[in-house]
Amino acid sequence: DTAVSQTPKYLVTQMGNDKSIKCEQNLGHDTMYWYKQDSKKFLKIMFSYNNKELIINETVPNRFSPKSPDKAHLNLHINSLELGDSAVYFCASSPRPSAPLHFGNGTRLTVT
Amino acid sequence: SQQGEEDPQALSIQEGENATMNCSYKTSINNLQWYRQNSGRGLVHLILIRSNEREKHSGRLRVTLDTSKKSSSLLITASRAADTASYFCATDGNAGNMLTFGGGTRLMVKP
């Protein structure tokens, strides 16, 4: 069983569209995250969600919004997609903040 | 800017040689972690070293931490072609203790 799974693996869409990426973890972890990895491999933390507390990286545009229906899921919604949103988005989870992360295999988003 | 920065950005060695990667960070930390990323995959946790530790070993991996210099190093001994990957350091010295990653070192081990 995959510990952290995200779907879809690839997402190609046009500018201005709204899209969602889903993430599920079966590890029983309390904290989930979204990271963005750009073409130069830099990883940037976007959100952390722990016990219904959302911590947002202040540099993330408000077009991005995480939604957590329950502890095992943290989905990422993106409105009005822009070319610069093209990247690989990684979901991750950990038992608590600062603990080692378990990553999904990423969603490659391409905005045309 | 990134909390952690790895050096070098890329490293190419022959199988059997040792590989050393360095990481520098800016703020106080509780712990520092190293991760590995194979092409097209998510990151995999390798090792965690706490701020009160100076050295840690795991198999062929050796990590050192110098909090006075705000730096860490990852040594992979007797490298193998399968060690080819990108290696990232991550620190937790920010609000919410979210892990912040550096830009990574791309290691290529030639058979």
Image (cartoon, rainbow, N blue to C red):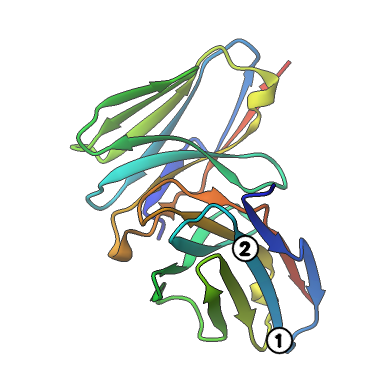
**Which quarter of the figure has residue B72?**
top left
Labels 2 & 1 near each other (Cβ < 8 A): no
For residue A17, side relative to residue B69 (left or right): right
Disc on res. A18? 1
Chain containing the residue with disc 1 = A
Q: Secondary structure at mark 2?
A: strand
Image x and y of residue B43, in percent: 58, 45
Graded by Cα atoms within 10 Å as few (under 14), some (14 to 19) or many (20 or more), the crowding at tag 2 reads many
Nearer-N-terminus badge (2/1): 1
Q: Is residue B25 above or below residue B34?
A: below
Task: Give the x, y percent position of residue B46.
Answer: 49, 34
Depth check, front residue: A5 or B44:
A5
Which is in the foreground here, disc 2 or disc 1? 2
| Total numbered badges shown on the rendered structure | 2
Identity of the amino acid at label 1? Asp
Residue B81, image quadrant = top right
Cα separation, mark 2 vs mark 1, equals 20 Å
Query: Mark 1: which secondary structure?
Result: loop
Which residue in the structure is indicated by mark 2?
A24
Which amino acid type is shown beneath numbered disc 2?
Glu
**Whole-percent x, y for residue B17 in the image:** 57, 12
Q: Quadrant of residue A16?
A: bottom right
Vertical position of residue B102 compared to residue A34: above or below: above
At a point 43% along the width and 28% down the height, the residue shown is B74
Provide residue B23's location: percent of width, then percent of height. Answer: 39, 39
Tell me what residue is drawn at x 40 percent, y 40 percent.
B33
Compared across the picture, whether B93 is left or right of B36 comes to left
